[in-house]
Amino acid sequence: MPEWMDTLRKIIGSPWQRMPRSWHFAILSVLLARVLFTLWSIAVLTYLPQYCRNLEFSGEPVMVDFDLQTSGGYAFNRTLDGKILIFQAAGTGFMQDVQTGSLWNLASGQAQTGPLAGKKLQLSKFGGEDFFPYFGIQKTAPPILALWQRYDANWYLSIAHYGYGHIPGDVHFQPLFPLLIRFVTLFLGNEILAGLLVTQLATLFMIKLLYDLFEEWGGPPAAQNSIFYLLIFPTSFFLFSVYTESFYIVFAILALQTMLREHWGWSGFWIALAILTRLQGVVLLLPLAYCLWRARSRIKIISAAATLILPGLAVLVYLAIRAANGSEEIIPLTERSLNAKMVFPWENLIYPLRYIATGTFNYINILNLLVTLLFGGLLVFGWKKNSAGIPDLFCCHDRPAHNAPG
């Protein structure tokens, strides 16, 4: 081997060898997952280049179509001469009705060939932007990258670009993630690339933290298997999209770890970041309160109160954003613009049961119920099976304080 190549190998290899095993596993996992998702993107673009669905939306028969090559969304009323047509995809820029086989132009809504040639569909009262919203954000040109610019990602990109108030209901989304996107965009010049970059880095750190945690509980095999099952779960693509899941998990793990070690200031800091990332961050105040109560013999009231300052400020910052942008409800218990409201966990179980009992359910209600019961059962089963090897997460009173915040 030439001397220069041997030197280069040593330069590159030495830092890698000095890294903890958890970083090795995290880096390789993220790189492999990113490659697999890219291949998945290519497969989708190749074999499913067009999304076409026939819907009954708010009492209107609607055909919605999304062209993955151009990122163009369309919505037409399916009623023609008193009959409701059914459509299917027919290649980029076109659709075909099942009844007559006529070929329709998506841009104009007019039949080009077939028995209905010359006929024209009316636009739906809901536009393509209502079904496939971009909120004024420029559509990413390369289709393989544009696949990741969907749904909630565009809310965050819109806030990063315009700030709050550009889209009704955008105050539902916390400010930290859009702020990070805006900062990284200053260097990359592209918001979707910035969003994907910060998300991949957060997922990388998330896997590293989870690996360390699971390794402590059950050794390297438990850590590797747990993360493997996490990454092959069907919704794991959210961890690699312009979404906040990985950020929130990072902050939640760090908050719980610092509670365990009784680093109360750091606990408050990580909880504050979690609150500014997702609404669910306020739930971390419950284990914090419990740990403070368990450690009450070793902590002064002033210190306990000081721990809550940063989370309290995070809550106030978010409520101030809502108030400044004219939100109907300052405390986000209901989001009318998103048809969403905050409920207790058991209400999500009662909801599908109620619809099934009345006979007005659809397959989504049944799917939601089955998934909830399945994973609820797996949680109980897994906890009983593994609890002997997992330490009490909140045994704060048995643990001495450490000096390091990590």
Image: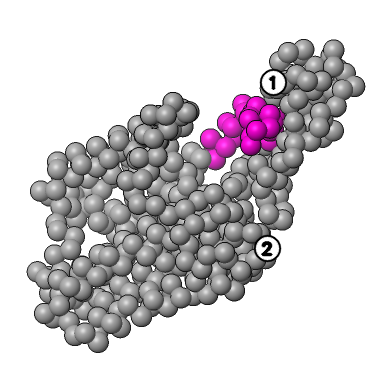
Task: Please indicate, yes or no, whether residue 189 appears anywhere in the rendered image.
Answer: no
Badge 1 is on which residue?
A: 86
The one nearer the camera, 38 or 183, is 183
Tag 2–tag 1 contact (CB < 8 Å): no
Residue type pointed to by label 1: Ile
Residue type pointed to by label 2: His
Relative placement, left or right, of 328 versus 308 is right
Q: How many neighbours does mark 1 have within 10 angstroms: few (below 14), some (14-19), or many (20 or more)?
A: some
Q: Which residues are magenta?
A: 38-67
What residue is rendered at 59% in x and 32% in y? 44
- Residue 184 higher or lower than 229, as above or below: below
Residue 203 painted magenta: no
Badge 2 is on which residue?
A: 166
- Residue 40 higher or lower than 6, as above or below: above
Judging from the image, the colouring scheme is one colour
Q: Secondary structure at mark 2?
A: loop
Task: Please indicate, yes or no, whether residue 398 appears anywhere in the rendered image.
Answer: yes
Distance (Cα) linking label 2 and label 1:
36 Å
Q: Position of residue 334 (x, y in %)?
A: 49, 57
